[in-house]
Structure formats: C-alpha cells, structure tokens
Amino acid sequence: MGTNQVQASSSMSSIILPVQLSTVPNTFYYDKIASQAIILRALMWVGKCGYATGGCGPINFDCSGLVAYAITGEHRRYFSTGGDPISNFTTYTIQSRHDLFAEINDPLPGDIANYHLGSDDGHCGIVLREGLMVHAVNTTDKVSIGWINTVSFPYRYYRYLGGLW
C-alpha cells in the first residue's frame, strides 16, 4: 500500500481509499476519509450492542473494544502495526503508544477522547463533534452517543496516526 492510501475494512470486503491530508494547526495531519470510516464503524453499533468488560463486538463492546473496532474494522483487540503487534488494546494503549496515537489539543470528528488514571480503567470513545462522542458506557446501556464529561474526568484527546496491518 502506498503512502497516500488507507485500507478500509468491513466484514464484507477490504478496499483501498486515497488519503486526503489537511494540516490542522498545532496538531498532526487530519485524514478526513479515514476519520469518517472510524466514525461510521462506531455509529453502526449505536443502540445495537450491549456492554461487557473485554467485549469487542459484535454482541457486546466495552469502550476500548469499540474504539479498537472503529479503528480496525475487526472484532478483536489484537492488530499488527507493521510488525509491532498490540495484543490487548485498552484505554492505556491510547496514552502509552505514541507511535500510534498523538495527543492533540483540538479534537476533530474521528479522534479519540480518553482518560486513564493510574489503577482506574478509564474510559474512551470516538469524537463526533466538540463535546460529543460515541462510546460503550456501562452494563445498563447499549453503545450510545453521549457527552464528553470534562468536568468530572480529565479527558485527553488523541489522533490515530495510521499504520493498520
């Protein structure tokens, strides 16, 4: 795959899409096409899947399982990034893997809202617009669209830098 292409996957097929990069001030390149694919993969489960710790769909998701699916299009937490596999994608992975996720100040649709505090499991979701994300919340709710609660939780925002398989 060339440097100006991105692979989009679904359970039905894989396609290669051209990447359109635009510069976002003081952050990293924003790939609108890849971000739209991430959003669509997350939105397709709103109201359809319940919550289960460790869930990566298609029956149940937890928050990081939904984010992992939205990024990869596959119902698994393992994905390879050019020979450097992530074997258990979690909220901590987003903060710790600077080769895959860049912390940003001004999130755009398709970026990741994430918090992780020490032993706390944290929470994450896919940004839809300012203050709003799609996420798997808890055992009483299905995958849903909700507010990013920056008052109670110290959310940080990350942009996926690419490198799927």
Image (cartoon, rainbow, N blue to C red):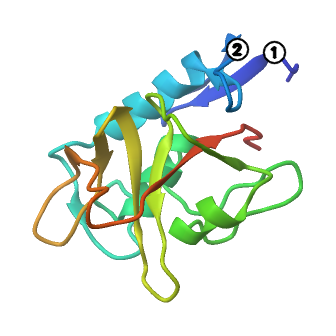
Horizontal relation, residue 6 to residue 92: left or right: right
First-in-chain label (2 vs 1): 1
Residue 12 seen in render: no
Residue at position x 63%, y 23% in the image: 30
Q: Residue 20 appears in which quarter of the rendering?
A: top right
Residue that carries the numbered disc 1 in the rendered image: 4
Quadrant into which the N terminus falls: top right
Looking at this view, name the residue that lies furthest to the left: 140
Horizontal relation, residue 145 to residue 1: left or right: left
What amino acid does circle 2 point to?
A: Val
Measure how far apart labels 2 and 1 are at the Cα level. 5 Å
> CB atoms at circles 2 and 1 under 8 Å apart?
yes
Number of marks in the rendered image: 2
Disc 2 secondary structure class: loop
Q: Residue 4 appears in which quarter of the rendering?
A: top right
Disc 1 secondary structure class: loop
In the displayed structure, 36 sits above or below 113; it is above
In the displayed structure, 42 sits above or below 78; it is above
Q: Where does the image place residue 41, in percent across and percent down from the top left?
A: 41, 35
Horizontal relation, residue 93 to residue 117: left or right: right
Q: Residue 65 appears in which quarter of the rendering?
A: bottom left
